[in-house]
Image (tube, rainbow, N blue to C red):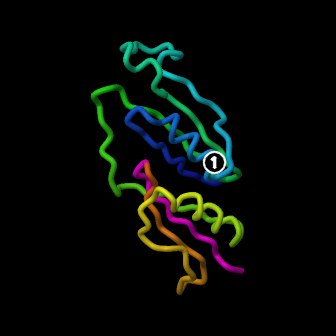
Amino acid sequence: MKNQATPYLTFNGNAKEALNYYKEVFDGEIISMQTFGEADYPTPPEAENRIIHAQFKKDALSFMVSDTFPNQPVEIGNHISLVLEMESEERIQNVYDALQDESEIFMELQDTFWGAKYAKVRDKFGVIWDLNYTKK
């Protein structure tokens, strides 16, 4: 079994919205989702509907998601980016098209000197995605 890092994304109360967005963009599924209110965890009433833990999966793409407690804000920044190796030019184009509408484009989808199609975008939730398709 290969070692694998699983990204864990934390949001300011909009984790469910983010999960639904990623479900659409990547055509994947939310395989589990639990709110603070559903968990056996001491929770203030204003946090009951926030996500304590969720998992997303699409083929080899997998990540976990949660919200913070109220008044514990997340600092959205560039300290994390997620590299996605795409399986085809069609797939990278579809994901790029889905992301670009409400994203900041750092590098438009283009052919690169390393023999790939590549784009770098920060989506509307502040997550930076490096999209890469290595040409055969």
| Residue drawn at point x = 56 percent, y = 45 percent | 21
Reading the image, the residue beneath label 1 is 24
For residue 104: magenta? no
Question: Residue 111, located in which quarter of the rendered image?
Answer: bottom right
| Residue drawn at point x = 46 percent, y = 55 percent | 123
Please identify the residue farthest to the front as the structure is shown. 101
- Circle 1: is it few (<14), some (14-19), or many (20+) Cα within 10 Å? some
| Residue drawn at point x = 63 percent, y = 48 percent | 24
**Between 14 and 40, which is closer to the camera in this rendering?**
14
Coordinates of residue 117 in the picture (x, y in percent): 59, 77
Indicate left or right for 54 with 124 as reference: right
Dot 1 amino acid type: Glu
The quarter in which the C terminus is drawn is bottom right
Coordinates of residue 48 in the picture (x, y in percent): 44, 17
Is residue 77 placed above or below 39 in the rendered structure? Answer: below
| Residue drawn at point x = 53 percent, y = 16 percent | 38
Residue stretch in magenta: 125-136
Q: The residue tagged with tag 1: helix, strand or loop?
A: helix
Coordinates of residue 119 in the picture (x, y in percent): 52, 70
Is residue 127 placed above or below 9 in the rendered structure? Answer: below
Indicate left or right for 77 with 21 as reference: left
Question: Residue 107, located in which quarter of the rendered image?
Answer: bottom left
Is residue 28 placed above or below 105 in the rendered structure? Answer: above
